[in-house]
Each structure stands twice: as structure tokens, then as C-alpha cells.
Amino acid sequence: MNIEDELIRENSKENALAIASYIGADTRRFAQLMALFLQGEYLVVQRAAWVLSKCADQRPELLTPHLKSMIENLQEEEVPVAVQRNTLRVLQNVEVPDTLLGTLAEVCFKYMEDPKAAIAVKVFAMTNLHNITQKEPALANELKLLIKHQLPYASAGFKSRANKILVALDKQESH
């Protein structure tokens, strides 16, 4: 199977799952997908993002060698929303090395503060920031302030996640 050709051929859940199944636990095939996700044409990048999230759901360990490039990719100027959303979604469920936490925190705060950022991107950024506060408790206050500032104007989905994270941050603070 040529992964790029399949991504271009059809945009469907069935195709995304078929490509993810083809990749399986094969690190070489996953590396091909990552190359398309990070450097492909816009359409290919968007579709690769969907397959990437399916692969990460099934085999999160495949992400480990690519975490640095994924986080660095989020620092680029023009990152498609699908890439932002899927990258942050998969990162919230993996162990990010300490050496990358600062960069990830910067990226997530940038998205949280951006009034034009998609709601899902903000929600996944918020969850990643909460995860980072487990190792870097000094960031908890900044996260709480940012969440509380946005709550009055936020969507239902943002409010739901925000309230859960605020409760968790308060528990974290009392320990």
C-alpha cells in the first residue's frame, strides 16, 4: 500500500482505519505517515492527521521517536487546524519527556491565549497544560488564571473541561 496515494484517494473513516491497520505496529510505515503528516501537501497533511490519531489510539508507543518533531511542528507559522487538534489530542495521552515539556507548555499557552484558536485545540491544549502541571506545579497558577479569564465567554465544551481541570488543580494545590 502506498500511504500517500491512499490518503489522497479517499477521505473516510473506513479508509483512515484501513491505513492505520496497514501501519499496525510497523515503525517504518509509521515513520512514512509521520513524514506525510509533517511535510506533505495541505490535503495530505489533514488526512494524515486523522490516521495518525487512529494509530496513536491503538499504539501510542509509535509516537515516542516523533514527539520532538511533532511539538516543534506546532511552533510553525501556518499549522492546519487538523494538525493542531490531532497533535494536541494524541499528546495528552502520552508521556512527554521532561526535555520537551517547556516547548509544549509554550505552544499550549499560545493556543489557549489565541482568540482565533479552534475550541477543540484550546481544550486539548488545556489538558496538555494540566498534564504538565503534574511535573511543573509552578505553571498551575498561570493555567488557572487563563482558564478563569476565558470561562465567561467559553463554549459548553470548553467550560466542561475547564471546570474539571480547575477542580483537579485545586486538589493538586492542597496536597
Image (cartoon, rainbow, N blue to C red):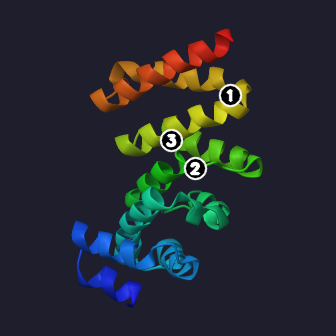
**SS class of the residue under badge 3?**
helix
User: Is residue 113 in view from this perspective?
Assistant: no
Query: Does 143 appear above or below 7?
Result: above
Where is 131 relative to 34, above or below? above
**Given this view, does label 2 or label 1 mark the residue nearer the observer?**
2
Of mark 1 and mark 3, the one earlier in the sequence is: 3
At x 63%, y 17%, the residue is: 172
Residue occupied by mark 3: 125
Cα separation between marks 1 and 3? 14 Å
Q: Nearer the viewer, residue 19 or 165?
A: 19
Q: Residues within 10 Å of mark 3 (few under 14, many from 20)?
A: many
Q: Hey, what amino acid is under mark 2?
A: Val
Secondary element at tag 2:
loop
Q: Is residue 138 visible?
A: yes
Percent of width and height locating residue 173 = 66, 14
Residue at 71% over, 25% down: 137
Identify the image quadrant of the C terminus. top right
Residue for point 49% across, 56% down? 87
Number of marks: 3
Q: Indicate the quadrant where residue 83 lies.
A: bottom left
- Marker disc for residue 107: none
Q: Residue furthest top?
A: 174
Q: List the single residue furthest toward the front.
A: 25
What amino acid does circle 1 point to? Leu
Classify residue 97 as left or right of residue 147: right
Give how far across and how far down residue 159 sits, in percent. Answer: 36, 24
Using a 10 Å C-alpha cutoff, classify the residue at mark 1 as few (fewer than 14 neighbours), some (14 to 19) or many (20 or more).
Answer: some
Quarter of the image for residue 134 reads top right
The residue to which callout 2 is attached is: 94
Residue type marked 3: Ala
Q: Quadrant of residue 8?
A: bottom left
Q: Which residue does the numbered mark 1 point to in the structure image?
A: 139
